[in-house]
Image (cartoon, coloured by chain):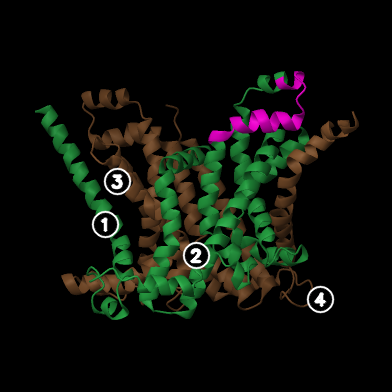
Chain colours: A green, B brown
Amino acid sequence: MKTRSIRLRSLSAEAAAVLLALLFLVPFYFLLANSFKPYADILLDASSLPKALRWHNYTKAFDVMNFLHAFRNSLLITVTSIAGLTLFGSMAAYRMVRKPSMYNNLLFTLFVAAMVIPFQSIMIPLMKVGSWFHLVNNMPGLWLCYIGFGSSLTIFLYHGFVKSIPAEVEEAAVVDGCSPYGVFWRIVFPLLKPMTMTIVILNSLWIWNDFLLPQLMLGRPGLRTIPLSTFSFFGQYTKQWDLALAALVMGVLPIVVFFLFLQKHIIEGITAGSVKG
Amino acid sequence: MTRKWINAGWMQQIIFTGPATVAFAIIVLLPFVMGMYYSFTDWNGVADTVSFVGFDNFKSAAQDEGFRQSFLFTAKLTAVAVVLTNVLAFLLALLLTQPIRMRGALRTIFFLPNVIGGLLLGFIWQFIFVKGFAAIGKATDWHLFKLPWLGDEQTSFWAIVIVTMWSGAGYLMVIYIAALINVPKELNEAAAIDGATAVQRLRHIIFPLIMPAVTICLFLALSWSFKAFDVILSLTKGGPFNSTQSVALNIYAEAFQNNRYGLGTAKAFIFFLIVAAITTIQVRLTKKREVEA
């Protein structure tokens, strides 16, 4: 009796979960199915399957939004910013943990406190700062922005992790004649790997998808990222859903593929990052 | 030994903490301090002369009907979206911690919407609400799907809530799953043997034990909704009639469309104070209720 009621319960849980999953997938169906249809077919019936796999919308949208270029820009911005963030963030956090001077403690408090500042509350003066330091309309400027904005969370997460690493190994390496930088790079940084993974994932989802900061900092069309070129595409082709949907599918595809390949790490990273954050 | 200076304590301090500190100072601290200053001026973003106007900007911000409206909207959206997204996420987590098949695939599906950025998300749902819902309405004849979802103030609000839930629930679900797995099985079983119902066990055993996760999830959902910008920009552009304009959108429009930078920074400062206060209070409150497992 008991086992049967348990099996019944898990069966109904399964049915509920599958039903919800199908509901979650509906938007993807609409997006994909209609991206292959000619405009007239979308108007006629948006819920039907496409009659044929027409790639016309895709080839056209690919050219119009200069997809390859946008993809390259997004990739370059995300990868470089994250390389800077992990390197500089881990270095700073390491120093703050190992040398907890009054100055370093104050600095750490500042980094952590700044996590409550929403981007929109400082974006206006940031534009002024951007023009003083020549950060507008060039990629290095945007890299610096992401390193500045991302350093709070990155340092906070690394700080907690470095604390859990015993200092004895480092002391032994110093006795063997290793320089302080060598100790960090050859011994400490590799030990930080699990946290580095978390930080890379959290920051790549953020930077890859970010819209407002690049929208403000990059005016030149040649520097457009995927969100920016999608936005300007929608400005030009309002309501031309056949092309727009193909553009959206291409825009979403890279990050979805990234997620599907790394999903185990991503889900672990999010759990680790939020439990400590 | 000529390179000895490079290993000196002060040099290490500069090399290790310098780059992050400089970037942080230029990108976060400096604009933050400048924002406080500009909020007391009539800066328009272009003119060289900036004059001090005292609290005028804060007064005009408080009297600005559009700004008040955007606050009201944001508060309402936050209240509704935080609760509903968390309920859905918790429900999904409960289902996925039962002994069911395809758990991995289901988890992937529920999480998937979250990796899509806010801007593209809004555009995708714009299509669903305008064309997709109309097609479903035609096929099923359900009134719900025949409404002008993005053309009406009431339904536009719910449209944004739906999109927020669709994209946020998977993320919070992952956190709830991690917490639920850590609830000791013996506690739950012992209570069940003692005759506690499923609801009682949920309330008196599971909830107190996963309180840290609840704190985190409320905190996350709260800050997502309060800072909502991208999704609303691409889904409704703040319309119809500015009824779905969030505070972040209002600040953006004030500065970059009306060119009233002084007023914009004053609004931004008020926005900062409220976001900082809410998040601090909320974390404190829920921290109190945490129970050690």
What's drawn in magenta, residue-wise?
Answer: A173-194
What number is the disc on residue B230? 2
- Amino acid at circle 3: Leu
- Subunit of mark 4? B
- Amino acid at circle 2: Asp
Which image quadrant is residue A102 in?
top right
Please state which of residues A75 and A97 is positioned toward the viewer in this rendering: A75
- Amino acid at circle 1: Leu
Are circles 4 and 3 on residues that touch, CB within 8 Å?
A: no
Q: Quadrant of the N terminus of chain A?
A: top left
Q: Nearer the viewer, mark 1 or mark 4?
A: 1
Mark 1 sits on what residue?
Answer: A23
Please state which of residues A183 and B188 is positioned toward the viewer in this rendering: A183
Mark 3 sits on what residue?
Answer: B106
Residue B239 position, x and y percent, is 44, 75
Residue B249 position, x and y percent, is 54, 69
What number is the disc on residue B49? 4
- Subunit of mark 1? A
Determine whether the residue tagged by mark 3 lies in a helix, strand or loop.
helix
Spatial CA distance of label 4 from label 3 is: 59 Å
Are circles 4 and 2 on residues that touch, CB within 8 Å?
A: no
Q: Nearer the viewer, mark 4 or mark 3?
A: 3
Whether labels 1 and 4 belong to a single chain: the reply is no
Spatial CA distance of label 3 from label 2 is: 27 Å
Task: Report whether B64 appears left or right of A129.
Answer: left
Are circles 2 and 1 on residues that touch, CB within 8 Å?
A: no
Q: Nearer the viewer, mark 4 or mark 2?
A: 2
Would you call the spot at circle 3 few (<14 residues within 10 Å), some (14-19), or many (20 or more)?
A: many
